[in-house]
Amino acid sequence: MNALDFSRLPVTNEADVVVCGGGTAGVFAAIACAHQGKDTLLIEQFGSLGGTATNGLVTPLMTVHIPGNPQCSYLYNQLQEKLLALGAGNKGGTAFDPLLLRYALEQMCVEAGVRLLYHTFIPEVIKEGDDVTAAVIANKAGLSLVKGKIFIDATGDGDIAVRAGAEYNKGNPETGKNQPMSLRYIIDGIDMIALGEFFSAEAQRTGVNGAASVWNNGVEMYAHCCRGNAVTLTKLFEEAIEAGDLIVEDHIYWQAFGMPGRYGSIAFNCPEFFENIDGTNPEDLSISQVKGKEAIVRQLAFYKKYMKGFEKAYIAEIAPMVGVRESREIICDHVLTAENILGKQKFEDVIAQSNYPIDIHGKQLTNRYLIEPADDGKPWYEIPFRSLIVKGIDNLLVVGRCIGAEFIAEASVRIQPTARSTGEAAGIGAALAIEAGKSIRAISGADIRAIMIEKGAKFA
Ligand SMILES: Cc1cc2nc3c(=O)[nH]c(=O)nc-3n(C[C@H](O)[C@H](O)[C@H](O)COP(=O)(O)OP(=O)(O)OC[C@H]3O[C@@H](n4cnc5c(N)ncnc54)[C@H](O)[C@@H]3O)c2cc1C
C-alpha cells in the first residue's frame, strides 16, 4: 500500500546489508555480517540494543536442552567473554545483567564496524519485482529511504516481511490468540540474606520446600510460584489474594531471578497478561504498559508487607518494551512444523539445533511439551537455513522469534540462544550472497554452518 509514493523520499543512507531491528537476532546478524567484511547498517527504534533481552528485561538465557549445551554461534563465545569481563555474566553462560548486556552488544557492534542508526522506526518498504530495494524510515529528521542489497528482518514481529507482502501465521490456530505477553521489572535494594532466611522460615511454616532459594552468600537467587504448583510460596500468595493484596492474575505466572553483578537485585518474569495480547496492535501494547505498571506497584507492596528483605527495596526499572512471546511467524521456504520439532527432524542446511520444550503459556497452566529423547542418540531438532528465507522475496531474510515456523514450533524456537544462531547464520548468508552476486536462495546452509564452526560455533 504505497499510495503515498514513498519512493520519492530522499535517500539518506545506503549499505550492503540493512538489518532492521536491534534485538538479540538483529545484533548477531549485523556483527556476523560485518565480520564478513560487508558494510552493515543496523536500524533500531530504541536507543540501545538487545530488544526483548534488554529493553524487555528478559534474563536469563534458556539452555537448548542438548547434552553439553552446545551453542550454534561463535559470537556467543565473544559475548560471554565480554559479559564476564564486565562482571555481568555467569560462568555457565546463562545468567546476565540486561542493563550491561545493552552496553556489551553495542561495543561488539562498534568493534565490528556495524553502523548504528538508533531512534529510527521502519514503517514501510519499497519493493521492486521480487526484491526489497529500500526501507522507509521515520525519525527526528523526518521520513527518508535507506537502500540496501539485502535486508534482514529482525523486528521480532516480521514487520519488514509483512510490509513487503509476505504471508504469515499469527496466534494459536485453534483459538486465534497469541501467547500471553508480560511487562517485566527489576527491584533493587533487597537484603538477600534476610530474603533467604525468610524463604527457609516459610518452607518450615508451610511444610513445602521448593522453588524459593538464595545461595552463594546472597549473590544468587531463584524463585517461582505459578498457580497449580505446590511450592514454598504458594500459601503466601493464596493468603495475599484472600486479603485482597494480590489478584489471581498475579499468581498465574510469577518467577524471580538474581543477576550476576547486581547484588540485592531481582528480575521478575511477570506480570503476565491473557487478554489484549496482540504484540502488533499498538493499543494492546499500551494497555499492557498501563495494567503492567499497576500490577508491578501492587506486587512491590506485597513483597514489602509479606516477605522479609524488601524493607528498603525499590523499583529499579520497568521494561520500556512489553515482552511479546509470539506475534507473527513469516512463511518461509521451509516452515518448521510441530512434527519437525517433536520428531527431532535433521536438515542438510541446518544452522541451529535445540531441544527446548514447546512452552505455551496460558491462563490455566503453562503447557510444556517435553521433547522425548531421540532413539538415534541425537536428542535435538534442527532449523534449516530455508526457514529464514522469506517465501517469494529474493533478498529478504527473517531472524529471531518470527522465522518460518508454526505456532507450536515457535513456542520452542523463540528462546534467545536460537535467536542468536538464526541471526548469525543470516548475517553470514547475506554476506555470501553479496560476494557471489546471487540471490540469497542460491546460498548453501552448509557453507554458512562451516563458517560458523570455523569461527568457534559448536554444533552437537
Ligand atoms: C516475558 C518473556 C519471557 C521470556 N523468557 C525467556 C527466557 O527466560 N530465556 C530465553 O532465552 N528466552 C526467553 N524469552 C524469549 C526471548 O527472550 C525472545 O523470543 C527473544 O529475545 C526475541 O529476540 P528477537 O531478536 O527475535 O526479537 P526482539 O528482541 O524483540 O528484537 C526486535 C527488535 O526490533 C526492534 N523493532 C521492532 N520493530 C521495529 C521497527 N518496525 N522498526 C525499527 N525497530 C523495530 C525492537 O525495538 C527490538 O529491539 C522470553 C520472552 C518473553 C516475552
Image (spheres, helix red, strand yellow):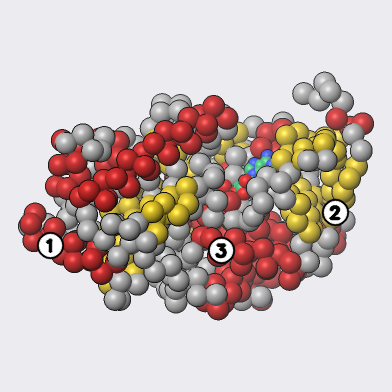
Tell me the residue at 68%/68% (across/down): 108
Instruction: Residue 191: name its quadrant.
Output: bottom left
Q: Is residue 164 visible?
A: no
Q: Residues within 10 Å of mark 1 (few under 14, many from 20)?
A: some
- Identify which amino acid the numbered label 3 is placed on: Leu
Q: Identify residue type, mark 1.
A: Ala
For residue 24, which quarter of the picture?
bottom right
Would the CB of label 1 be found within 8 Å of ligand 1?
no
Find the residue positioned furthest to the top: 3
Q: Is residue 313 toward the left or the right of residue 128 in the image? A: left
Q: Secondary structure at mark 1?
A: helix
Label 3 sits on a secondary structure element that is helix
For label 1, the residue is 201
Q: Residues within 10 Å of mark 3 (few under 14, many from 20)?
A: many
Report the residue at 90% width, 42% height from top.
Answer: 11
Q: Please, what secondary structure does the residue beneath circle 2 have?
A: strand
Mark 2 sits on what residue? Answer: 15
First in sequence: mark 1 vs mark 3: 3
Q: CA distance from mark 1 to mark 2?
A: 60 Å
**Residue visible at 77% across and 23% down?**
1
Mark 2 crowdedness (10 Å alpha carbons): few <14, some 14-19, many ≥20: some
- From this viewpoint, is residue 142 visible? yes
Image x and y of residue 331, in percent: 62, 38
Tell me where residue 153 appears, x and y as whole percent: 68, 46
The x and y percentages for residue 449 are 64, 66
Determine whether label 1 and label 3 are within 8 Å by CB.
no
